Image (cartoon, helix red, strand yellow):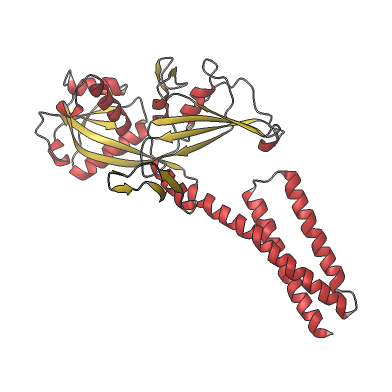
């Protein structure tokens, strides 16, 4: 009598423990509708109550039945627990909250300048763009001065265009500290004129600084979200921003991929709309009504704030964006790794960079 009861009690305890683990993951992931969560908790509670009822009934047969039910349920519970645990691990590998962003700067001089390293800038005038991300620019300047152990004469300019002109045309300044994204914009401008930026300037050094997240600008959405409803109970929009760099996702850069995902949980339908990167629109709180390419909105602000405000404004879409996702080149690699790799079929044998692909199936 005691042995079946002991075995039943042990297996019942295992069942309860696994049920608690499953409930923990359900609430931690918070991806299931309330109705599904309620149903799962109710079923687990009923099984727990039934097991307790059988366990405390007299009779060896009832205790054996309780042990068998608990064993079967424990095995079955391991399946969703494993799935939820894998999902939780994958999400943790793909996301992470941060209070800082990273800005990359180039220290640039004219092509005919004799300066080759930072220490050559001692005694130079250096231009600074104070119209954009002044805090990180000043931090980068302080980093330069620490490295060369000397203070530089700083000239402030209200925008990247004025900064570039002061170096390359009017020669008011001997060097400039320019955000990498703006430097790449000027590179593209020269290439559009069949010229090379290296014919005009050269990079003396590169600086990376970490800055606190800024307060995002706001746009006036056409229809405020129904705050009383959960996200999955009403139509909602997700903005996907793909920035043109590898490495840290917190690096400010151009948003070359801009996708709006409209999801209607009621009709079970989803629509993806790709917004052209070169669409000319004003950036709320940034360009003062002037038009610029949508891709450049990714350079400003944090957490896709300027890109979202730009897309939400009346003159463009007038929609409300509920959530956002930011990815870069490294994100794609991490997503593939998190999924355990993917198989891609190629119609040709070819090599690209350091990689070689064969005709047929390729494991990535």
**Residue at image point 56% right, 56% down:** 86
- Residue at the far right in the pictured view: 58
Residue 287 appears in the rendering: yes
**Horizontal relation, residue 160 to residue 287: left or right:** left
Along the viewing direction, whichever of 203 and 357 lies nearer the viewer: 357
Task: Report the number of numbered marks.
Answer: 0
- Location of residue 160 with respect to 202 vertically, above or below: above
**Horizontal relation, residue 343 to residue 80: left or right:** left
**Residue at image point 66% right, 63% down:** 78
- Location of residue 208 with respect to 71 vertically, above or below: above
**Horizontal relation, residue 253 to residue 264: left or right:** left
**Residue at image point 47% right, 21% down:** 284
Q: Which quadrant is the N terminus positioned in?
A: bottom right
Residue 364 appears in the rendering: no
Q: Position of residue 332 (x, y in %)?
A: 43, 44
Q: Position of residue 320 (x, y in %)?
A: 59, 26
Image quadrant assignment for residue 173: top left
Q: Position of residue 160 (x, y in %)?
A: 30, 24
Along the viewing direction, whichever of 129 and 333 lies nearer the viewer: 333
- Location of residue 26 with respect to 289 vertically, above or below: below
Q: Position of residue 196 (x, y in %)?
A: 19, 26
**Residue at image point 35% right, 24% down:** 131
């Amino acid at each position: 009598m005691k042995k079946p009861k002991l075995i039943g009690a042990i297996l019942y305890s295992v069942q309860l423990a696994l049920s608690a683990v499953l409930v923990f993951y359900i609430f931690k992931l918070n991806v299931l509708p309330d109705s599904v969560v309620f149903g799962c908790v109710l079923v687990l509670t009923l099984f727990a109550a039934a097991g307790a009822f059988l366990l405390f009934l007299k009779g060896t047969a009832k205790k054996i039945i309780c042990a068998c039910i608990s064993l079967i349920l424990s095995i079955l519970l391991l399946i969703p627990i494993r799935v939820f645990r894998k999902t939780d691990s994958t999400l943790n590998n793909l996301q992470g909250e941060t209070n800082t962003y990273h800005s990359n700067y180039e220290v640039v001089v004219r092509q005919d300048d004799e300066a080759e390293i930072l220490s050559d800038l001692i005694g130079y005038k250096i231009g600074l763009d104070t119209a954009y991300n002044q805090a990180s620019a000043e931090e980068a300047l302080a980093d330069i001065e620490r490295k060369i152990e000397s203070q530089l004469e700083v000239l402030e300019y209200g925008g990247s265009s004025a900064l570039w002109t002061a170096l390359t045309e009017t020669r008011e300044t001997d060097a400039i500290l320019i955000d990498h994204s703006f430097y790449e914009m000027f590179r593209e401008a020269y290439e559009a004129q069949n010229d090379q930026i290296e014919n005009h300037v050269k990079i003396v050094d590169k600086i990376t600084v970490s800055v606190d997240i800024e307060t995002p600008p706001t746009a006036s959405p056409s229809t405020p979200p129904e705050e009383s409803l959960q996200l999955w109970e009403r139509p909602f929009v997700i903005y996907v921003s793909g920035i043109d760099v590898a490495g840290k996702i917190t690096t400010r850069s151009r948003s070359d991929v801009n996708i709006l995902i409209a999801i209607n949980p009621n009709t079970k339908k989803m629509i993806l709309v790709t917004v052209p990167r070169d669409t000319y629109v004003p950036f709320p709180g940034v360009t003062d009504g002037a038009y610029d390419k949508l891709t450049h909105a990714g350079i400003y602000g944090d957490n896709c704030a300027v890109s979202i405000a730009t897309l939400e404004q009346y003159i463009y879409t007038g929609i409300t964006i509920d959530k956002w996702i930011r990815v870069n080149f490294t994100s794609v690699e991490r997503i593939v790794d998190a999924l355990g790799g993917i198989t891609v079929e190629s119609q040709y044998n070819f090599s690209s960079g350091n990689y070689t692909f064969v005709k047929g199936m390729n494991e990535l």
